[in-house]
């Protein structure tokens, strides 16, 4: 594995770890109850720590392929969740999401940074890192 691929793999792993710790901070420390879409995002984020961590320890990018799929799905869920929070045409879809409505905003920094925005940013960073790893691998073949 090249040094660049190793660095990208580490960045993807670190991003997944920070996102997981952040979600646990919001729910366990601040007491924010996750909505249904937040749970889906957690289900897609948490395994990425193990996937990228294992690939990093074994120094094999091939192990991390499922991370590309999970991060891609996570991006889609996060974008949809963010649209439910911020676009009026989508907001009615979030009201019947479960115990906690998906259009509720626990945080709203600078008028646009919400929890789904943070999760979406993490998924995008992981996805882009993985795409660069694939590109680097293609160049080496």
Image (cartoon, helix red, strand yellow):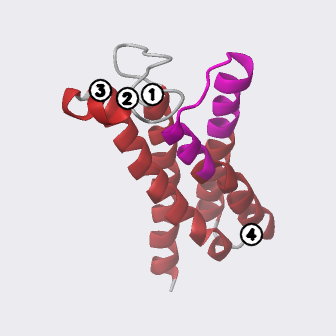
Which one is closest to the eye, mark 1 or mark 4? 1
Which one is closest to the eye, mark 4 or mark 3? 3
Residue 94 image offset from top left, x and y in percent: 36, 33
Are the residues at dot 2 and dot 1 in contact (C-beta closer than 8 Å)?
A: yes
Q: Which mark is residue 101?
A: 1
Q: Which mark is residue 59?
A: 4
Mark closer to the chain start, 1 or 4? 4
Q: Which residue is mark 2?
A: 95
Badge 1 local density, few (<14 within 10 Å), some, or many (20+)? some
Q: Is residue 63 above or below residue 141?
A: above
SS assignment at label 4: loop
Are the residues at dot 1 and dot 4 in contact (C-beta closer than 8 Å)?
A: no
Magenta includes 110?
no
Q: Which mark is residue 86?
A: 3
Mark closer to the chain start, 1 or 3? 3
Mark closer to the chain start, 2 or 1? 2
Mark closer to the chain start, 2 or 4? 4
Are the residues at dot 2 and dot 4 in contact (C-beta closer than 8 Å)?
A: no
- The region drawn magenta spans 18-43
């Amino acid at each position: 594995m090249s040094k660049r691929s190793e660095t990208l793999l580490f960045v993807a792993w670190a991003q997944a770890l920070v996102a997981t710790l952040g979600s646990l901070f919001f729910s366990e420390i601040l007491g924010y109850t996750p909505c249904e879409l937040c749970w889906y995002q957690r289900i897609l984020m948490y395994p990425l720590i193990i996937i990228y961590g294992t690939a990093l320890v074994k120094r094999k990018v091939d192990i991390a392929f499922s991370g590309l799929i999970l991060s891609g799905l996570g991006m889609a869920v996060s974008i949809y969740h963010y649209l439910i929070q911020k676009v009026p045409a989508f907001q009615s879809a979030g009201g019947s999401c479960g115990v906690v409505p998906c259009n509720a905003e626990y945080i709203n920094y600078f008028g646009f940074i919400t929890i789904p925005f943070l999760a979406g940013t993490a998924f995008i960073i992981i996805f882009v890192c993985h795409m660069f790893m694939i590109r680097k691998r293609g160049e080496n073949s």
